[in-house]
Amino acid sequence: MLSPVWSFALARLVLALAVAVALGLLFGHVALWLVVVLGGALGWQFASLYRLQHWLRFRSQEDPPDLGGVWGDVVALVGRLYRSKKFHRRRTLVLLREFRRFAAVLPDGVVLLTVRHEIRWFNPAAARLLELRRKLDFGAPITNLVRDPALARYLECAGAGPGIVVRVQREGAERCLALALVEAGAWRLLLVRDVSRETALLEMRKDFIANASHELRSPLTVIAGYVEALQDEPDLDDEWRAPLADMRRQAERMRRIVEDLLELSRLEAGGEEASFDPVDMPALLEQLVRDAGSRRPDGPRLQTEISAGCGLLGNAPELQSIAANLLANALQYTPAGGTVTVRWSGDAGGACLAVADTGIGIAAQHLPRLTERFYRVDKGRSRDSGGSGLGLAIVRHAVQRHGGRLEIVSVEGQGSTFTVHFPARRLQQFCNNP
């Protein structure tokens, strides 16, 4: 259905043609009159088009032309579009000013990068933390200004993982900066935070724990030795034997806690990545299972599903610590009559160590915090069973040093499965599941 403007234009054209025919019939030469009338209409259209084009070119300086018909409707539509554009432009400018004002007071740095890691914009906090200079550093790759191999690897992996911490020299002192990359369509946001104070406190806590553990080792050894000597005394009164046995158990528990703390401190200070020494994982796991079965003959049933000939490249003591802690954890929380299964397999995607049990299970709210040091789901039960709360923290650090990840699946009352996924570059040779 035609709009009223077009209906009026067509009606006017038909009326002009009718007048031309009438004049032709009246004075003769109908064709000539039609040419004159149509030529006049075409000339008017060209004149209107010229006025519209002239106004569009100089619309910021001139008022819109007063045109009728279809051309007047076009002028009105263009005017509305122009006013809408000006409104949205003003609104965009206001939002941009608000964003820049907000970004200027952010305590954390924000750097806008292209997919090629070139700087397009940064806020004052980023300029201060990374020593960036406006205009001079726009368009430069961020890796040219922050020369750290860890940052280059992190950006090449498109920000895989929670982020990284780099150390930079600022104003004669070393600063620790936490960097995290956020994908934003065709752009990337690099978030920068100064974590120097947090890092220093963490280092102080690690040093304190390591030093305290070293200092406690010798007194505990002496105490345990004297307690053992007193227990072996033939003339010892029977009423002292139970307290001395309890003292010996507690001293042994404290010794295990100290050893775990020393192991955790060693892992945290051991560098970024473990060595690539060949380790016979099937033999290691079989030996651990045999030792666990001999120590707890009345405990849960042990079974294995191990792919023979599938080795791993890594640090043997750390890999043994991973498997031993997971196995001990499963045995500790699985009652007699239950089952603990140790699985080991590998394929083109990497290697997998899984320890599954049919024990008491873990509630979902505890799973995110299981690998924290000294965290216990049931504090009373863990204390009675002698747990230190450090086993899974040791596992997490050792797994990270091997480039792997720890996955925990548990259902309360049904059991748990702790799975360690090792990357393919750690697999000594390709092997198939039996």
Image (cartoon, rainbow, N blue to C red):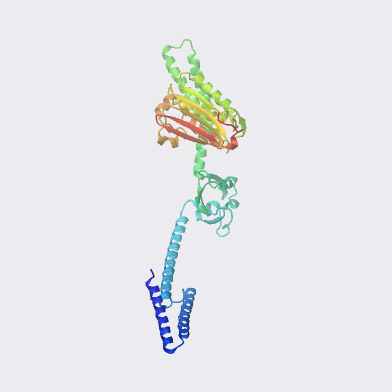
Residue at position x 40%, y 82% in the image: 18
Residue 259 visible? The answer is no
| Between 50 and 139, the one nearer to me in the picture | 50
In front: 174, or 59? 59
Q: Residue furthest bottom?
A: 27
Q: What is the x, y in percent for residue 118?
A: 57, 54
Residue 128 in view: yes
For residue 347, what is the image quadrant?
top right
203 lies above or below 253 = below
- The residue under the point 47% across, 76% down is 49
Query: Which residue is farthest top?
Result: 235
Instruction: Please state the horizontal and vertical placement of residue 307, each as a whole percent of the image.
Output: 56, 28
**Residue 224: % across, % down:** 50, 20
Q: Quadrant of residue 269?
A: top right
Q: Is residue 111 above or below residue 419?
A: below
Quadrant containing the C terminus is top right
Q: How many marks?
A: 0
Q: Depth check: 172 or 250 in front?
A: 250
Quadrant holding the N terminus: bottom left
Asked if residue 237 is positioned above or below residue 47 in the image, the reply reads above
Please report the residue visible at 56 percent of the width from the left and 60 percent of the height from the top.
135
Q: Nearer the viewer, residue 4 or 346?
A: 4
